[in-house]
Image: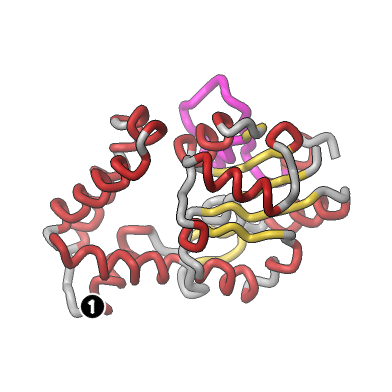
């Protein structure tokens, strides 16, 4: 093993506020008062597309992304106003006011670094993620921080995994990716040739795939 990639949200950092509530904050910044029920219903419906449209997600991600955003436009009632609000939402998601480190993040990161492995962050996030990781004190541990907004691709697209591998000068066969999304992280990494672990903190019903219940399990999974 040469390189280890970690997702950020749900793996390194935890949300202190649920995503729909962060979205409501973004709406408020734009002078839009969105009902909590509308935001929660819209996010539930949009996220259900991950299972319902899994084949499309993997074969034509831009089209899937369009369907996802159209669902949010419809169910929030924001229509074309969603685009600007969503940008603010992505920025707020990486704010230290709504995120903190998981307790198991730094110990696991330290063990991986001390073992001499290259370490990268690979996240579907806004560019503000870099500033967040700096403020949380963990950015110096990483050899690269790959952010979808800067790369122009999102997991599960192969292109972002290729970019990440090139950033750490590693091949898929000698790399592992750990993420908390079955669709974006596990399927994306696996079909790009990386070893993949699903970080399943809550214990999901998915079986038959390599899973970790905590980042504290990562060193032993990598035989460190």
Please identify the residue farthest to the top as the structure is shown: 208
User: Start and end of the magenta stretch?
Assistant: 197-216
Which residue shows up at 48% across the image and 35% down it?
182
Residue, x 67% and y 46% (percent of image)?
Answer: 165
Task: Examine the structure image and report whether residue 142 is included in the region drawn in magenta.
Answer: no
Image vertical order of residue 215 relative to residue 88, above or below: above
Q: Is residue 93 left or right of residue 208?
A: left
Q: Per the image, is 203 magenta? A: yes
Instruction: Please say whether residue 94 is visible from this viewpoint.
Output: yes
Q: Secondary structure at mark 1?
A: loop
Residue 104, visible in the rendered structure: no
The residue lying at 63 percent from left, 55 percent from top is 121
Label 1: how many Cα within 10 Å (few below 14, some 14–19, many 20+): few
Along the line of sight, which residue is nearer the eye, 156 or 41?
Answer: 156
Residue 27 in the image: x percent, y percent?
A: 24, 71
Look at mark 1 in the image and give the residue it sits on. 30
What's the magenta bit mostly, secondary-structure-wise?
Answer: loop
**Count of number-bearing discs:** 1
Name the image quarter holding residue 198. Answer: top right
Q: Quadrant of the N terminus?
A: top right
Q: Quadrant of the C terminus?
A: top right
Q: Is residue 130 left or right of residue 30?
A: right
Q: How is the image coloured?
A: secondary structure
User: Residue 92's x, y, as percent?
Assistant: 41, 70
């Amino acid at each position: 093993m040469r390189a280890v990639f970690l997702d950020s949200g749900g793996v390194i950092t935890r949300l202190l506020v649920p995503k729909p509530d962060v979205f409501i904050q973004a709406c408020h910044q734009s002078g839009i008062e969105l009902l909590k029920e509308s935001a929660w219903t819209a996010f539930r419906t949009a996220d259900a597309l991950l299972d319902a449209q899994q084949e499309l997600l993997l074969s034509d991600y831009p089209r899937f992304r369009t369907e996802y955003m159209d669902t949010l436009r419809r169910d929030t009632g924001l229509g074309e106003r969603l685009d600007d609000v969503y940008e603010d939402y992505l920025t707020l998601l990486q704010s230290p006011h709504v995120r903190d480190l998981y307790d198991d993040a730094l110990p696991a990161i330290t063990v991986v670094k001390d073992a001499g492995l290259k370490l990268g962050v690979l996240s579907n996030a806004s560019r503000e993620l870099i500033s967040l990781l700096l403020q949380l004190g963990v950015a110096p541990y990483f050899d690269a921080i790959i952010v979808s907004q800067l790369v122009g691709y999102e997991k599960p697209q192969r292109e972002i995994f290729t970019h990440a591998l090139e950033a750490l000068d590693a091949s898929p066969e000698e790399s592992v990716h750990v993420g908390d999304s079955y669709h974006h992280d596990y399927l994306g990494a696996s079909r790009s040739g990386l070893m993949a672990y699903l970080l399943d903190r809550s214990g999901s019903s998915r079986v038959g795939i390599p899973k970790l219940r905590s980042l504290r399990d990562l060193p032993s999974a990598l035989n460190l």
